[in-house]
Image (cartoon, helix red, strand yellow):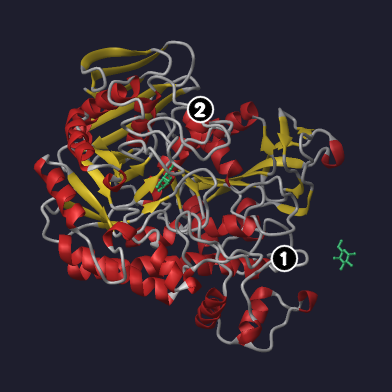
């Protein structure tokens, strides 16, 4: 077998048989069959079992498990097991341990305790990857390689001396000499000018604010360093195990932003990600949907793999509520709606020991005789039926731009308002669109924007000239481009673009801002219609039509929202974060101008997404409200396996309607 299960939405999860006696393995296989599991990810944290001493491999147990799975027709996404070193490795080479900002070593005893720049760690990891590739390349259960695990989750940034030397090498390749680095980092400020490369350090704990460009480059360096590590593992697999797809699981969830996944995505044979619902968010289901649309953007619109999510509670939030009945199915299908063709979980069987013993799983502590396992079995059944839509793509006429590097710069030190978090506006726009049944692709500014009717540019604080030009070209070509405050402010070195904000977009928008007036927490400003929060600014609009104005406070009478006709499209500007109703009304105008229609006519709280292929179209509907809801749609509902003519959804229910 050399391909991912092709006839269905793949269903399964992380399998850690080394935590269980052999008798349990047999039961696992039987239960996997019962639940219609079609794949497992094996070996993610198995290094100390696979290589109990340097160069001494013990593959016996893994052979056995691979064979059992193959006999049961379950495909294996085999990990390179390099996510966490065994204790013997860090004992022999303590220099592989990561170091935090304050110079503290992060000791073994948890996971991912390795320095991203360590050549010693890399050498040992590549040796293990080589051994695994050679041993299992021919195994019929092998369907995919899973490199490492959630790169960067715990070991980035590392501030050790090995990283310091590697950072200098990275900087020398990036900058044409030390003076170029001094210019880029603006070291004329606070006597920071370097006269020798050896003076350059990681941005360790400082007295007060660190140099923002130094920090920005360190974030870029960290992402590049781990990407280089991934490439090295992938190269081993491509050479020793040709033809087997390779992936590593991203973390496109809530506030994870340590890697620039737009640079990583092209290196994946198939993009995969992990997503967990964060209960402390104000709108967790909306964040889940955003994550799916972001992952699809990384996959360039193609189907992607949800490698991990949870059937119920996690163990790493302050309080870990269980999922409500029906939520396991609803959350999974929300990912499928947004382009996932694989539904994976962490993990198959809930651990008895270790720090994840209270993390939910497909088989809970209570065992198979449980409501959770019955829901898992029902999910397996539904996913089998959904096989017909595999390979279809999601329809979206709107793009929301997302750039990890802009986010890094915007979260730099000493900004106008620390209350402004990079994802806030993008998430708000996405949520309001979702409430209208309008689907957006979340894409990088370098994506081809010309096919979109509407392009939203939220908080694109740092922007290159090239990306700014592409955004302008999209408006010229006919898109309605909506730019929000604190966009286009700085260049790729995080130097402010002078002459008035938003420097990069001033001409496009026909506006000019002389000063920011960020609002205090809880403070609002009255607008002509509705109110704004978080931000306001002293805006003039010599070249644009004024759509709304500040109606109170120091900016009273000043423009707040504007629009300028550009080529065949238009450029809209929003200088505050309005209340939902006001923001929604503005989005309505922008969508109307762009001729964007929803996937289905829905009320807020009912989610609607359409996937389409050459074989047909499928409308995904989910009712997140506490009332029954009806949606005009007809066809065959693959969740209930019944024909429908008008869909009625109970609170919490989902439908996947094959249309026509
Ligand atoms: C102090 C310092 C200045 C400057 C200001 C900023 O006064 O002496 O260099 O940093 O704070 O408010
Ligand atoms: C991540 C990891 C898994 C597990 C889960 C728990 O996704 O990859 O090993 O720790 O978190 O939510």
Q: Position of residue 635 (x, y in %)?
A: 23, 19
Residue 498 numbered mark, or none: 1
Name which residue lies at 33% across and 59% down: 48
Q: Nearer the viewer, residue 422 or 364?
A: 364
User: Within 8 Å of ligand 2, the CB of disc 2?
Assistant: no
Q: Relative to residue 42, is residue 388 drawn left or right? A: left
Which numbered disc, 2 or 1, marks the residue that appears first in the sequence?
2
Quadrant of the image where one finds ligand 2: top left
Q: Position of residue 613 (x, y in %)?
A: 22, 38
Q: Position of residue 322 (x, y in %)?
A: 46, 26
- Does the rendering let one see residue 90? yes
Q: Relative to residue 22, is residue 336 drawn left or right? A: right
Name which residue lies at 68% across and 46% down: 420
Q: Which residue is mark 2?
A: 321
Q: Give the quadrant of the C terminus.
A: top left
Q: Are marks 2 and 1 in contact (CB under 8 Å)?
A: no
Q: Residues within 10 Å of mark 2 (few under 14, many from 20)?
A: few
Q: Quadrant of residue 208?
A: bottom right
Q: Residues within 10 Å of mark 1 (few under 14, many from 20)?
A: few
- Does the rendering let one see residue 38? no
Q: Position of residue 182 (x, y in %)?
A: 67, 80
Q: Nearer the viewer, mark 2 or mark 1?
A: 2
Element marked by disc 2 = loop
Q: Relative to residue 336, is residue 136 drawn left or right? A: left
Q: Nearer the viewer, residue 165 or 491?
A: 165
How far separated are the C-alphas under marks 2 and 1? 49 Å
Q: Nearer the viewer, residue 301 or 625?
A: 625
How many badges with numbers are in the image?
2
Name which residue lies at 35% across and 58% down: 148
């Amino acid at each position: 077998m050399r391909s991912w299960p092709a006839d269905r939405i793949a269903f399964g999860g992380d399998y850690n048989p080394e935590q269980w006696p052999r008798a349990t393995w047999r039961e696992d296989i039987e239960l996997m069959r019962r639940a219609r599991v079609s794949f497992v990810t094996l070996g993610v944290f198995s290094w100390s079992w696979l290589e109990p001493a340097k160069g001494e491999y013990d593959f016996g147990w893994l052979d056995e498990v691979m064979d059992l799975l193959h006999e049961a027709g379950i495909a294996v996404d085999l990990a390179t097991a390099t996510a966490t070193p065994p204790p013997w490795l860090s004992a022999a080479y303590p220099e592989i341990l990561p170091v935090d900002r304050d110079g503290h070593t992060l000791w073994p005893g948890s996971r991912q305790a390795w320095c991203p720049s360590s050549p010693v760690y890399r050498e040992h990891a590549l040796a293990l990857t080589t051994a695994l590739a050679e041993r299992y390349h021919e195994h019929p259960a092998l369907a995919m390689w899973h490199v490492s695990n959630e790169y960067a989750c715990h070991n980035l940034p590392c501030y050790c001396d090995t990283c310091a030397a590697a950072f200098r090498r990275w900087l020398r390749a990036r900058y044409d000499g030390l003076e170029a680095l001094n210019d880029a980092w603006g070291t004329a400020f606070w006597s920071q000018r370097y006269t020798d490369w050896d003076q350059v350090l990681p941005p360790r704990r400082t007295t007060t604010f660190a140099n923002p460009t130094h920090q920005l480059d360190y974030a870029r360096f960290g992402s590049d360093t781990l990407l280089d590590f991934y490439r090295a593992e992938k190269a081993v697999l491509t050479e020793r195990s040709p033809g087997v797809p390779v992936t590593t699981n991203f973390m496109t969830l809530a506030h994870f932003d340590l890697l620039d996944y737009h640079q990583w995505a092209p290196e994946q044979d198939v993009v995969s990600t992990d997503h967990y619902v964060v209960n402390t968010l104000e709108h967790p289901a909306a964040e889940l949907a955003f994550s799916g649309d972001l992952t699809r953007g990384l996959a360039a619109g193609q189907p992607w793999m949800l490698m991990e999510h949870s059937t119920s509670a996690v163990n790493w939030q302050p309080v870990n509520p269980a999922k409500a009945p029906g939520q396991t199915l609803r959350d999974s299908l929300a990912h499928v709606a947004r382009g996932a063709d694989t539904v994976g979980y962490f993990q198959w069987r809930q651990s008895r020991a270790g720090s994840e013993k209270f993390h939910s799983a497909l088989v809970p502590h209570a065992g198979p005789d449980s409501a959770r396992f019955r829901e898992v079995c029902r999910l397996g059944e539904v996913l089998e039926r959904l096989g017909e839509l595999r390979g279809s793509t999601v329809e979206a006429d709107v793009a929301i731009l997302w750039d990890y590097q802009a986010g890094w710069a915007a979260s730099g030190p000493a900004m106008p308002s620390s209350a402004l978090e990079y994802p806030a506006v993008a998430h708000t726009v996405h949520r309001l669109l979702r409430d209208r049944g309008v689907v957006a692709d979340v894409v990088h500014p370098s994506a081809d924007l010309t096919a979109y009717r509407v392009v939203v540019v939220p908080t694109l604080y740092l922007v290159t000239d090239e990306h700014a030009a592409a955004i302008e070209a999209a408006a010229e070509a006919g898109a309605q481009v909506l730019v929000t405050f604190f966009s286009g402010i700085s260049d790729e070195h995080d130097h402010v673009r002078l002459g008035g904000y938003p420097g990069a977009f001033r001409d496009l928008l026909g506006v000019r801002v002389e000063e920011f007036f960020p609002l205090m927490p809880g403070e609002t400003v009255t607008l002509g219609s509705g109110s704004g929060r978080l931000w306001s600014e002293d805006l003039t609009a010599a070249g644009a039509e004024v759509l709304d104005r500040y109606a109170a406070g120091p900016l009273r009478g000043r423009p707040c929202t504007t629009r300028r006709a550009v080529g065949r499209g238009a450029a809209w500007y929003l200088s505050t974060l309005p209340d939902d109703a006001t923001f929604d009304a503005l989005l309505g105008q922008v969508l109307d101008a762009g001729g964007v229609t929803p996937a289905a006519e829905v009320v807020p709280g009912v989610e609607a997404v359409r996937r389409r292929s050459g074989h047909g179209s499928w409308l995904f509907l989910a009712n997140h409200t506490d009332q029954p809801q009806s949606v005009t749609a007809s066809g065959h509902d693959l969740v209930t396996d019944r024909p429908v003519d008008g869909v009625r959804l109970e609170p919490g229910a989902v439908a996947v309607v094959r249309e026509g």
